Image: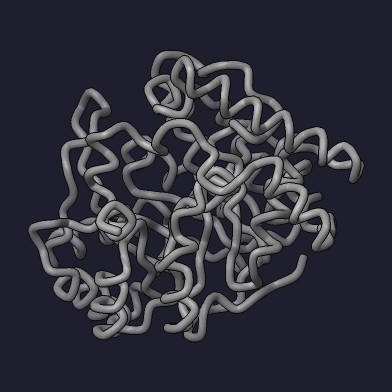
């Protein structure tokens, strides 16, 4: 497994990370035993970056990762945690809290669930519109000083917020959706990150399964994709046509559509670390094989002809959630 430095100020991490969200119900029921085995398999394959959020399964995901790391030698694992999203007992989202006191409270609970004395990379999941980003980052910076956080990241924020946050404390990475179907960061956000020495940890590299070649419908009514615009009638058919075109090109390289989609993200730069959202060992193995897939300039051009920029049908989130994305404000204003 190749390792890369996460931004100018960050640690060495594996060339791809493991996104653990799907192991805690966001895409329907998951098998706990298989989830633990998948985390173990990722560690054995050299994956060092595990990504989670304290709101994934309302703490379930952190407990799962904590258990997995206790069962196997997890000393080399780097855990990235998003915080701030507020949930209700029915599982709904009710806003974000980036107040300094809340930051420290969220952190205390995450440390307990993970069974660790520090979080490697800590980041607000979204911008709290009622709290200056300087206050939120300043609170995390105090925890860096105290030793309970090692590095600070950001998630789904736009250029102005990135600059303001970086002025308070070095930012190692921006976690944001990036794939063949979601290329909004290329205009302003990615160039700014490169200017400031901030890496990108890219989630949704398979567009929540659309580009995987394995889509068979939502995994129950609680699957986020059941109400995601890109999976609605009309949009879904168009997006699956794009996925089929990618699969045909991948076949010419003796690869799967998922591997081609991940390899495309990898080819966009060494400062972009894809988060593989596998929740079973079979999909993990398939995805990691993308690290050995070399795409030539001709291959990349053919892929972008098959899946042109802005070709995706439907927004990446429902309208109420899109409104909470600071990262989308610059794009909508331009």
Q: Dividing the image into 4 quarters, which one contains the C terminus?
A: bottom left
Horizontal and vertical percent for residue 91?
A: 27, 28
Looking at the picture, tell me which residue is in the foreground, 196 or 114. Answer: 196
- Left or right of 233: which side holds 244? right
- Left or right of 134: which side holds 33? right
Q: Can residue 264 be seen in this view?
A: yes
Kindly indicate the quadrant of the structure image that contains residue 122: bottom left
* Residue at x 73%, y 33% (from the top left corner): 245
Horizontal and vertical percent for residue 126?
A: 27, 54
Rendered position, 280 above or below 149: above
* Residue at x 83%, y 58% (from the top left corner): 298
Kindly indicate the quadrant of the structure image that contains residue 244: top right
Rendered position, 246 above or below 119: above
Q: Which colour scheme is used?
A: one colour
Q: Dividing the image into 4 quarters, which one contains the N terminus?
A: bottom right
* Residue at x 35%, y 65% (from the top left corner): 154
* Residue at x 54%, y 35% (from the top left corner): 208
Rendered position, 125 above or below 221: below
- Left or right of 285: which side holds 207? left
Looking at the picture, tell me which residue is in the foreground, 150 or 330. Answer: 330
- Left or right of 205: which side holds 154? left
């Amino acid at each position: 497994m190749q390792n890369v430095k996460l931004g100018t100020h960050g640690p060495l991490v594996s060339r791809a990370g493991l996104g653990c969200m799907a192991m805690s119900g966001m895409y329907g029921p998951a098998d706990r035993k298989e989830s633990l085995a998948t985390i173990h398999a990722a560690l054995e394959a050299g994956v060092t970056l595990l990504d989670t959020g304290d709101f994934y399964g309302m703490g379930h995901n952190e407990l799962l990762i904590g258990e997995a790391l206790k069962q196997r030698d997890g000393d080399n694992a780097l855990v990235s945690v998003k915080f701030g999203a507020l949930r209700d007992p029915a599982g709904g989202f009710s806003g974000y809290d980036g107040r300094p006191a809340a930051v420290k409270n969220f952190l205390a609970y995450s440390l307990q669930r993970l069974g660790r004395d520090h979080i490697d990379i800590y980041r607000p999941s979204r911008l709290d519109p009622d709290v200056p980003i300087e206050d939120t980052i300043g609170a995390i910076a105090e925890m860096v000083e105290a030793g309970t956080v090692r590095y600070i990241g950001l998630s789904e924020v736009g250029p102005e917020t990135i600059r303001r946050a970086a002025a308070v404390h070095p930012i190692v990475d921006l976690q944001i959706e990036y794939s063949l179907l979601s290329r909004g960061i290329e205009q302003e956000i990615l160039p700014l990150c490169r200017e400031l020495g901030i890496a990108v940890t890219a989630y949704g590299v398979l567009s929540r399964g659309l580009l995987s070649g394995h889509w068979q419908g939502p995994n129950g009514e609680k699957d986020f994709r059941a109400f995601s615009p890109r999976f609605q009638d009309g949009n879904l058919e168009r997006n699956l046509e794009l996925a089929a075109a990618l699969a045909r090109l991948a076949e010419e390289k003796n690869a799967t559509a998922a591997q081609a989609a991940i390899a495309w993200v990898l080819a966009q730069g060494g400062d972009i670390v894809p988060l593989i959202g596998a929740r079973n060992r079979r999909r993990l193995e398939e995805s990691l094989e993308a690290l050995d897939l070399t795409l030539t300039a001709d291959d990349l051009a053919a892929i972008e002809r098959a899946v042109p920029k802005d070709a995706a049908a439907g927004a990446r989130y429902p309208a109420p959630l899109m409104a909470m994305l600071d990262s989308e404000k610059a794009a909508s204003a331009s």
